[in-house]
Image (cartoon, coloured by chain):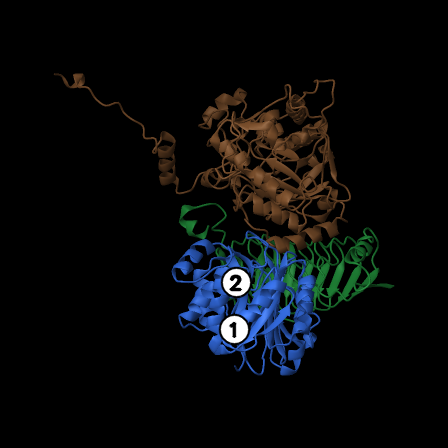
Amino acid sequence: MKDNDTPRTLPRQSATFTREVNAEIRRAAATGIYDIRGGGAKRRVPHFDDLLFLGASISRYPLEGYRERCDTAVTLGTRFAAKPLELAIPITIAGMSFGSLSGPAKEALGRGATLAGTSTTTGDGGMTEEERGHSEKLVYQYLPSRYGMNPDDLRRADAIEIVVGQGAKPGGGGMLLGQKITDRVAGMRDLPVGIDQRSACRHPDWTGPDDLEIKILELREITGWEKPIYIKIGGARPYYDTALAVKAGADVVVLDGMQGGTAATQDVFIEHVGQPTLACIRPAVRALQELGMHRKVQLVVSGGIRTGADVAKALALGADAVSIGTAALIALGDNDPRWEAEYNELGTTAGAYDDWHEGRDPAGITTQDPSLMARLDPVAAGRRLRNYLNVLTLEAQTIARACGKSHVHNLEPEDLCALTVEAAAMAGVPLAGTDWIPGRGGY
Amino acid sequence: MTTMLDLNETPLRDVNAALQATAGMQPNTAFEIVNPRGSHALAVGLNAPISVRIKGSTGYYCAGMNQHANVIVQGSVGPGVAENMMSGTVVVEGDASQYAGATGHGGLLVVRGNASSRCGISMKGIDIVVQGSIGHMSAFMAQKGNLVVLGDAGDALGDSLYEARLFVRGSVASLGTDCVEKEMLPEHVDLLRDLLARAEVEADPSEFRRYGSARTLYNFHIDNAQAY
Amino acid sequence: MCGIVGLFLKDSRLEPELGAMLTAMLVTMTDRGPDSAGIAIYNADAEKPFKITVQSPEGDTEFGTLADRVAALTGAPARLERKGSHAVLALGRDRAKAVLAMIRSDFPGLRIMSQGNRIEIFKETGLPQSVAEAFGVAAMRGTHGIGHTRMATESAVTTLGAHPFSTGPDQCLVHNGSLSNHNSLRRQLVRDGMRFETENDSEVAAAYLTHRLQEGRDLGGALRDGLADLDGFYTFVVGTETGFGVLRDPIACKPAVMAETDRYVAFGSEYRALVDLPGIREARVWEPQPAEVYFWERAA
């Protein structure tokens, strides 16, 4: 028998050592540096897709679309602030830094949010004129680095968000590689041009909730007790962190699950630290309820919000609003297939491009390169974001009406069922077709 | 004319509001604050070239985010004095706790006594003069500005330093990662002389040593991985 | 996450005022810890009985029964002094072991707060002011004392979860910060025979020190051992029958201020706690260095 007639085993790719894993081992061996990238967790985790709304039929009566009102307005910061933020829709734009994003991209976010009646948020790099000028309501992030932090901008802001952590990297700092530290970015951050910028993981002048309470007092005294103070936490220990944020005096808690994005951090951090958004909401809501603060301290949930269904599900689980980052960038034009040829040149493909920190974004959003930046028309991009926000709102209203609700905030966990045991356990809703909530009632 | 404010009688909110109401005013407005008794967030967010004299010790974040004002504390201060200061002058006649001058962008902070740990952490352009000694991790991630210490410095001075300049007359317990001693050039002597004069401190600039960034962390290199 | 105050008197003329001084200090730390408060006080009682402090939610009935049982066991009328939800039992040293065993086996509703020659611990949930008033702390005298106001991080807001923690005779510990390896350490200490009442990280630190002391280390040595074995963030203040110690972790983020005069040593999480102490303006005031053991001892 000839050799090539002998039956052979088929080459088999290891499920443990996949092509991606092997490529990463080779890359690490060649470069000696961990993989840094942007975005949030890419692995599959239990998510809002694993939940379904029950809808109304005979026992519950639905509302008529377009005829019977289903309100969406939400007020953030009603606990202590003299001037709470009144938003037309329960969807806000998450914090993203100038530096990580271009000036026109920040402008587009402001334009889109303003047209939709909601707020946008600064990031780790200070407040730019582009976003202040084009954002009717702007939340000013107060971060460990304090880049560009100044009292004038603090007073120009409509709310202050003290960032303790973010879902992509709870417990971690950040790193913006030198390519993006241009003259303007460096100037705003008081850094030399072209160096890697390292962001600290803890705030420089407080540690823990007892100090945080005093920090909040200071910020309120500087801004005359007018502005809502948000505390943003990553999805690490949502029950305790929410309770402590409330005890420290927060007006609003922003809770970011592991699918939440970042401009740049270690891939190992993004994929292996933190809990899925779905698993974070109920513990946070329970903490608020136990303190008698649910709906008094508002809860904003972020990390993987894409559709009006996601919005409605987050609200049903107890959130007062949601926040979008990655989805907003895609609405502006990030990872658009029209730039496929250029993505290919960068060794990637539209939809997978995540080297935002390298500053070579073909879509002109996560870059400081003037020729790339010029590709984004902030007016047109702002309109796209407005359209997208309106669609999210309409979708959430559609679902809320189908559940018989005249306000999206009247959605409840009892309006939901879960498709998987995992999602049922995490969201605290019954598995579809049963009354079984894993982990409850002694199961 | 000097306005007296007594924290035993006037709530903190009203004291700060009175000080902040001077925003945009011309100089020569003076305030004296008595009975601070360690209050937090006192004289924060000022935005005018007024002078404020605090008679006693304060708590956290005294004179935080100061702009233009001249604040003198006749006592000691808690953590984060003059944090994120933009301009103006803050003088502490006693000691300062942790984080003195943290993330300050400008202005002058003078501590006549000692400052404890993390003095000048993440400073971004402020000038800090400490007549006594400073604690550990001072000038951590300091980006810009000058830190002058007449006494000694604790462990890990200038860890992960950027472009801030550190001048220490006494001993340094240890230098942090990427912080090295640098030559005192005539320009540094001049700078130091000016800083000492502005702080109204008698000292000979030639007795100081200068420390700064070795800049080995400025762009990632695997051989420095132990430092991350 | 919390506020800490402590006083170690050198001048015995201040002893009648210890409780009043500590109460005032404790109340200034209310913002740092509104959940619960507690105080350990070391009383230099001339006749030196052995003291057991117990707590009961149903004090009225339980304490009465306890007094009868102790009298029966010791053959003498029990000396039981009620203070709020707590009661201090004073008895002869030779009967202490038997009484402790009897309380543990026959009074499951009673919690033993402290035991020793001098220590009394009083702690409850609620604001520091009301806790101090409930026990009449201001009227207490003593040689040294430690107080704590708690903002609970991960463990429950309960009486037992309040500080100080006492895991050995005349020992107590209070903590500001958050340990990161206490679960593993607790399992090890349980294997070594230590008992735990709560899931609190601070109780692990207390038990760790007690265990080291049982192994023959002095307090200073036990605290130094802790630098290697306790991970996370902490400022500890500890008391023993005759001593008072302070330790901050090597990172030392949590605040700590100390003052010393020829009459006392004082500790506060913030300077505010110290402002009304006699002669504070002339005191040496400093912040304890990271990873450095501070320890004061008086004649027994």
Image height of A64 relative to B5, above or below: above
Q: Residues within 10 Å of mark 2 (few under 14, many from 20)?
A: some
The one nearer the camera, A216 or B193, is A216
Amino acid found under the numbered disc labelled 1: Ala
Q: In which quarter of the image is residue C215?
A: bottom left
Is residue A273 in view from this perspective? yes
For mark 1, what is the residue?
C72
Per the model, the C-alpha gap separating discs 1 and 2 is 15 Å
From the top left corner, tell me how far across and down residue A267 is, in percent. Answer: 46, 38
Closer to us: A407 or A166: A407
> Closer to the N terminus: mark 1 or mark 2?
1
Q: Which chain is blue?
A: C
Say above or below: A38 vs B217.
above
The brown one among the chains is A
Residue A260: percent from left, percent from top: 55, 35
Q: Report x, y in % for residue B32.
A: 81, 64
Q: Check disc 1 and report its element: helix, strand or loop.
A: helix
In the drawing, does residue C233 fall left or right of residue B54?
Answer: left
Q: What residue type is labelled 2?
A: Phe
Badge 2: chain ID: C
